[in-house]
Amino acid sequence: MKHTLEALPDAILAERAADGDAAAFEVIVFRHGSLMRAYAVRMLGDRAEAEDVVQDVLIQAWGQLDRLNDPSAIRSWLMRMVSNRAIDRIRRRREHTEIEDWNAPAPAHQSPERVVEVRMQMTALSSVLDGLPQMQRESWMLKELGGLSYLEIAESLGVPASTVRGQLARARQTILREMEVWR
């Protein structure tokens, strides 16, 4: 039964899951969980915290699937929820930051100049990633941020591993070319 579900498009799976079909929701989680985790890790910089965020989002999604207006938009809905939850976590971190010594100089890697430079580099990289075709961007994020193997990425995206290799190669070429000014 699960193999038949895996062939279904997201919209049908979302409708079935909204009707209480746990197996359909499991396929949605398998299909999009890796990307959700990779994105959360990228935003939070902490794998354990990212896992918590994704887990919370999946629990919330299971309970709110009946509110999803466009079942074909399940992936973007889940990613938006991950983004919102991760931003909430980042905000909570800032509220609880303790200031120990007001006059202590910042370490060299945290100097204002270095912080600005890193932020500019990350903004440039985000812009390059946003400009990649969707398959290249997802392949790159799952490999580089999620740490998945080619086979895991292929399974997650529903394409052959050879396609993943090609997509990653093209994504890396574009990123290297566009980020050359930051070398």
Image: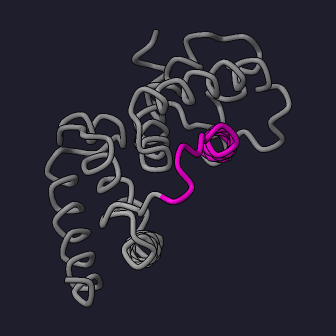
Relative to 170, residue 81 above or below:
above
Place of residue 87 in the rendered image (x, y in percent of width and height, measured from the top left): 65, 47
Q: Which residue is depicted at the point 17% across and 45% down?
A: 161
Q: Main secondary structure of the magenta part?
A: helix
Question: Looking at the image, can residue 86 be seen?
Answer: no
For the question of whether residue 95 can be seen, the reply is yes
Q: How many tags in the picture?
A: 0
View extreme (bottom): residue: 181
> Could you tell me residue 22's position as x and y percent?
61, 10
Residue at left offset 84%, top offset 41%: 69
Query: What span is in magenta?
Result: 77-103
Image vertical order of residue 33 relative to residue 137, above or below = above
**102 or 143, which lies in front?**
102
Direction from residue 87 to residue 69 in the image, left or right = right
Residue furthest out toward the front: 103
Instruction: Give the answer, above or below, for where 28 lies relative to 102.
Output: above
Task: Report if residue 166 lies within the magenta region.
Answer: no
Quarter occupied by residue 31: top left
Based on the picture, tell me whether residue 95 belongs to the magenta stretch. Answer: yes
What residue sits 77% from the left and 18% below the top?
A: 63
Q: Quadrant of the C terminus?
A: bottom left
Please determine whether, in this image, residue 77 is positioned above or below residue 135.
Answer: above
Residue drawn at 47 percent across, 71 percent down: 130
Is 136 situated left or right of 106 in this image?
A: left
Determine the image quadrant of residue 14.
top right
Q: Quadrant of residue 30?
A: top left
Q: Nearer the viewer, residue 77 or 50?
A: 50
